[in-house]
C-alpha cells in the first residue's frame, strides 16, 4: 500500500490537475517519499511509474474511504511568522521584468508550469505588471523547494533587507500582494502576519489551512472604490474557483485515453519537459501517466459528484460563472476591469488551454468572449496603473 501511495503522490505532483484533498491529497506523504527514494533520480521515476497503473486506483479508493472520517479540531494557530535569513541560491528558469513595476518587491515564484494554482498566481502578477523570477520545480525530485517545510507549489518568496518572506498558498499569495499594492504603508511582512496558518489533523495527518486567505487586509481604505458587496462577491467566486471549479478540470482533461494522452503532451510542451527530463523518462511519464490519470479521473468524477457526462458539468460550471458575470452587466465580474475573481477563473482555465476540453467549452458555452478579454488584459498588464499610488 505504501508503495502505491508513493506512486500516486508522484503523479499528483506531476499533474497538479487534481484536487488538494481528499482523494489525492497532495502533500501528505512528502517526507516519506523524499527520505526513502531520493538517491536515484531515474529509478525513482521508473519504480513509481510501474507502481502507478494498479497502485494509483487502489490508493485513490483508500484515501477516499479514509476521508470520510471526521476532522479533528484545530491544534494550533501559527502567528508572528519569522522571516528566513536566506534561501539557497537557485537557478532561475525565467525572469519576468516589468520596467514600470514600482512595488520594490523582489519575488521568486516556485512553480510547476501547468499547475492551475501556479497559473492563477502568474495571471495576477502579469496583470498587475509585477516583476518576478520563475523557478521551475522538478516535480519528482523537487530539490528546488527542499529548503521549505511547506511542500506544495506555488511558493512565493519576497526578498527584502531583513531576509526572505515566504508566502505559501496561491490565494493567500494573491490576497497578501493585493493588500500590499493597495496600501504600501504596511510592509509585506506585517501583512503576511494577518494570514495565520491553522494546523489541524485529518486522517492522522497534520494539515494546514490559511483561514482568511480570500480577505484583503486594507478594507477600510478600499471601501469607497469597491463597495462591500463587490468585495464579498469577489471573495465568494475566488473561493468557488478553489473549492469547485478546479475540480471539474481533471475529469475533463483525462476523460478518454486519447484525451489524457493529448493533455500529457500539452503538459510536456508547456512545461518544457524536453529540457527537464531525458527522452525516455518523458515518454514513460506521458504514456503511463495518461493511462493512470484516465483511470483515476473516474474516481474524481464520483468524488466531486460530477455528471456522467463530465463535459456537461464543466459547461454547467462555466455557465454558472458567466451568469454571475452577466449579472453585473459589465465585461468582467469586476466591472470594466477584471477583479481577483476574474483573474482566478482565467488563471486556472489557462492551465488547460491546450486541451480538447477547453476547445469544447469554447464551442458549447459563451465563455470565450470573457476569457479572451481577460487574457488580453493580462497580456497587456492592464492592472499596472494600480501600482502608481
Ligand atoms: N491550496 C494550495 C494548493 C496547492 C497545491 O495543491 N499544489 C500541488 C500541485 S497542484 C502540489 O504542489 N502538491 C505537491 C504535493 O502534494 O506534494 C494553493 O492554492 O496554492
Ligand atoms: C512604462 O511607463 C512609461 C511611461 O509611464 C511608458 O511610456 C512605457 O510604455 C511603460 N513601459 C511598459 C513596458 O509598460
Ligand atoms: C510557509 O510555510 C513555512 C513552512 O511551514 C512556514 O515556516 C512559514 O511561516 C509559512 N509562511 C506563511 C506566510 O504562512
Ligand atoms: C502602464 O502601461 C502602459 C502601457 O502598457 C503605460 O502607458 C502606462 O504608463 C503604464 N502605467 C504605469 C503606471 O506604469
Image: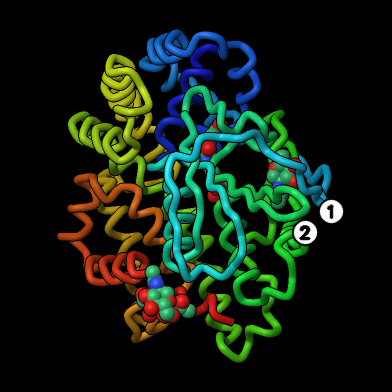
Instruction: Quadrant for residue 194, please give it.
Output: bottom right
Residue under label 2, please give it. Answer: 193
Color style of the picture: rainbow
Callout 2: SS: loop
Q: Is mark 1 within 8 Å of ligand 3?
A: no
| Residue located farthest toward the left when viewing the structure as drawn | 363
**x, y (%) of residue 174?**
56, 61
How many other residues sit within 10 Å of disc 2, few (<14), some (14-19) or many (≥20)? some
**What residue is rendered at 48% in x and 61% in y?**
125
Eyeballing the image, is 116 above or below 337?
A: above
**x, y (%) of residue 282?**
31, 21
Query: In the image shown, does 336 or 180 lie closer to the viewer?
Result: 180
Give the label on residue 282, or none. none
Report the Cα–Cα distance between label 2 and label 1. Answer: 6 Å
Instruction: Quadrant for residue 88, please give it.
Output: top right
Q: Quadrant of the C terminus?
A: bottom right
**x, y (%) of residue 313?**
31, 53
Q: Can residue 389 be seen by looking at this rendering?
A: yes
**What residue is rendered at 22% in x and 57% in y?**
361
Q: Earlier in the sequence, mark 2 or mark 1?
A: 1
* Discs 2, 1 touching: Cβ within 8 Å: yes
**What residue is rendered at 48% in x and 49% in y?**
117
**x, y (%) of residue 99?**
46, 66
**Quadrant for ligand 2?**
bottom left
Q: Quadrant of the N terminus?
A: top right
Eyeballing the image, is 23 above or below 277?
A: below
Query: In the image shown, does 149 or 361 lie closer to the viewer?
Result: 149
**What residue is rendered at 28% in x and 71% in y?**
373
Residue under label 1, please give it. Answer: 80
Amino acid at each position: 500500500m505504501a508503495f502505491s501511495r508513493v506512486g500516486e503522490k508522484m503523479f499528483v505532483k506531476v499533474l497538479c490537475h487534481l484536487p488538494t484533498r481528499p482523494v489525492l491529497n497532495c502533500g501528505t506523504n512528502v517526507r516519506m517519499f523524499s527520505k526513502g527514494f531520493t538517491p536515484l533520480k531515474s529509478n525513482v521515476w521508473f519504480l513509481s511509474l510501474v507502481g502507478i497503473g494498479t497502485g494509483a486506483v487502489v490508493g485513490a479508493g483508500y484515501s477516499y474511504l479514509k476521508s470520510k472520517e471526521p476532522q479533528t479540531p484545530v491544534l494550533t494557530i501559527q502567528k508572528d511568522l519569522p522571516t528566513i535569513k536566506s534561501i539557497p541560491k537557485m537557478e532561475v528558469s525565467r525572469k519576468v521584468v516589468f520596467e514600470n513595476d514600482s512595488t520594490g518587491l523582489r519575488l521568486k515564484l516556485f512553480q510547476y508550469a501547468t499547475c492551475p494554482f501556479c497559473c492563477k498566481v502568474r495571471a495576477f502578477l502579469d496583470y498587475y505588471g509585477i516583476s518576478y523570477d520563475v523557478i521551475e520545480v522538478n516535480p519528482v525530485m523537487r530539490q528546488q523547494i527542499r529548503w521549505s517545510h511547506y511542500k506544495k507549489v506555488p511558493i512565493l518568496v519576497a526578498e527584502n533587507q531583513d531576509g526572505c518572506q515566504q508566502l505559501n498558498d496561491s490565494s493567500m499569495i494573491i490576497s497578501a500582494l493585493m493588500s500590499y499594492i493597495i496600501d504600501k504603508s504596511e510592509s509585506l511582512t506585517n501583512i503576511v502576519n494577518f494570514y495565520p496558518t491553522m494546523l489541524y489533523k485529518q486522517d492522522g495527518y497534520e494539515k494546514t489551512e490559511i483561514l482568511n486567505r480570500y480577505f484583503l487586509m486594507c478594507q477600510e481604505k478600499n471601501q469607497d472604490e469597491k463597495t462591500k458587496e463587490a468585495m464579498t462577491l469577489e471573495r465568494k467566486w475566488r473561493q468557488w474557483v478553489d473549492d469547485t471549479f478546479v475540480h471539474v478540470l481533471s475529469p475533463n482533461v483525462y476523460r478518454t485515453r486519447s484525451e489524457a494522452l493529448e493533455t500529457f503532451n500539452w503538459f510536456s510542451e508547456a512545461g518544457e519537459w524536453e529540457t527537464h527530463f531525458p527522452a525516455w523518462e518523458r515518454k514513460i511519464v506521458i504514456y503511463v501517466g495518461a493511462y493512470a490519470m484516465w483511470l483515476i479521473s473516474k474516481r474524481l468524477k464520483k468524488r466531486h459528484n460530477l455528471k456522467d457526462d463530465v463535459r456537461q458539468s464543466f459547461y454547467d460550471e462555466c455557465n454558472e460563472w458567466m451568469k454571475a458575470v452577466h449579472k453585473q452587466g459589465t465585461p468582467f465580474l469586476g466591472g470594466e476591469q477584471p477583479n481577483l475573481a476574474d483573474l482566478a477563473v482565467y488563471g486556472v482555465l489557462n492551465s488547460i488551454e491546450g486541451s480538447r476540453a477547453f476547445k469544447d467549452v469554447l464551442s458549447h458555452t459563451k465563455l470565450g468572449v470573457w476569457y479572451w478579454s481577460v487574457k488580453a488584459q493580462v497580456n497587456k498588464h492592464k492592472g499596472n496603473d494600480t501600482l502608481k499610488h
